[in-house]
Amino acid sequence: MKAAVVNEFKQQLEVKEVPKPTLSAGEILVKIEACGVCHTDLHAAHGDWPVKPKLPLIPGHEGVGIVEEVADDVRSVKVGDRVGVPWLYSACGECEFCLSGRETLCPDQQNGGYSVDGGYAEYCKAPAAYVAKIPDGLDPVEVAPILCAGVTTYKALKVSDAKPGDWVAIYGIGGLGHIALQYAKAMGFNVVAVDIQQEKLELAKQLGADYTVNGMETDPAKEIQQEVGGVQAAISVAVTRKAFEQAYQSVKRGGSLVIVGLPNDELPLPIFDTVLNGVSVKGSIVGTRKDMQEALDFAARGKVRAIIESAPLDAINDVFDKMEKGKINGRIVLTM
Ligand code: NAD
Ligand code: ZN
Ligand code: ZN
């Protein structure tokens, strides 16, 4: 089968023939139709993070396709079903986190397109128990970004504890951010969209942002404090430290900063302000299988829709190049 492979960090991916995966107990084989390109895949290909991916690696954790084969013991998924293979590729099912419905915190999890091969390929295998069932009627290319960008931002908004009618700020209107803002609207929040590129802010306005700020032109935190009195929650999905600092400063008393973007960096916090203002700072990682069902349901009901451009698998190096330069409006989805 054809796949895009990272052989070495910071090198071009090689699109080549590799063996088709063979199934073990509990697994299914998915004929991939489409796979979204997440900024995490670029971090993986660069070896940006403290925990490195396997090499060689087939990246991709927004893969959607049709089940072509199932292992003898698989009952929950059948041949012909449309499924997604997410970042939470598997978990142990037995630790305190798995047992309490927080399987994204499982220390024994595998991650699609990181610790195991993912969706930048014609085929991908996955444990039946962790794939996402794609609701009928959704286009495979359009739904692919929900598998990561969607569930991740939906979950971040949930853990922010903001309530309908509250103001929230989304820092970074890229692949995650443009979907975050749609979930935020659908959940009843007033939304400030912040980016450093005007075209991203134009998209944000089209998608219903109540207020937009260009971080290149003004200090977003100051403007947010002045115009809306600060936000109950700021979600940072940008990839620069500056955006996290500004997001923190945008939060009002009693509010929260939810950290989602993953630059390999640190965020120094002023202890006095954090304590006196009662600000919470939390990390949020993708979403559980239950969060995934909910996130997909929003898409199935037409409340959230990724803005996508499709590209062939062979174009992956150009897609990464565009992503690095911040030139993607919405999400690019590879088609097989
Ligand atoms: P992306 O490249 O599509 O979007 C990043 C956006 O941030 C761009 O629109 C860019 O213009 C904007 N930006 C850059 N600097 C900014 C600044 N100073 N202020 C405001 N906006 C700024 O990336 P993506 O696919 O949306 O991923 C974003 C990050 O989220 C990555 O680090 C990725 O690894 C991470 N991520 C985390 C999780 C999780 O579970 N926590 C899941 C998926 C992705
Ligand atoms: Zn992702
Ligand atoms: Zn576990």
Image: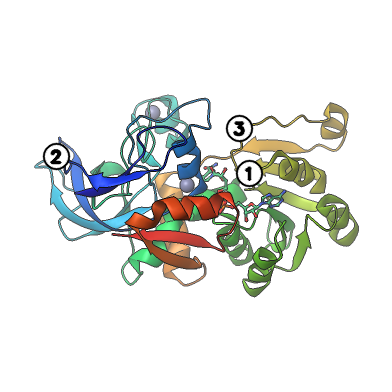
Q: CA distance from mark 1 to mark 3?
A: 9 Å
**Spot occupied by residue 251 in the image (x, y as percentages of width and height):** 79, 47
Q: Nearer the viewer, mark 2 or mark 1?
A: 1
Q: Is mark 1 within 8 Å of ligand 1?
A: yes
Identity, as a three-letter code, of the amino acid under mark 1:
Val
**Spot occupied by residue 198 in the image (x, y as percentages of width and height):** 71, 65
Q: Nearer the viewer, mark 3 or mark 2?
A: 3
Of residues 210 and 11, the one drawn nearer to the viewer in this rendering: 11
Image quadrant where one finds the C terminus: bottom left
User: Which residue in the protein does label 1 denote?
Assistant: 239
- Secondary structure at badge 1 equals loop
Q: Earlier in the sequence, mark 2 or mark 1?
A: 2
Q: Residue at x 85, y 60 (%)?
A: 228
- Secondary structure at badge 2 equals loop
- Residue 290 is left or right of residue 90, and the answer is right
The image shows residue 181, relative to residue 61, as above or below, that is below
Identity, as a three-letter code, of the amino acid under mark 2:
Thr
**Dot label at residue 264:** 3
**Dot label at residue 22:** 2
**Spot occupied by residue 166 in the image (x, y as percentages of width and height):** 74, 58
* Residue 78 occupies quadrant: bottom left
* Residue 218 occupies quadrant: bottom right
Residue situated furthest right in the rendering: 226
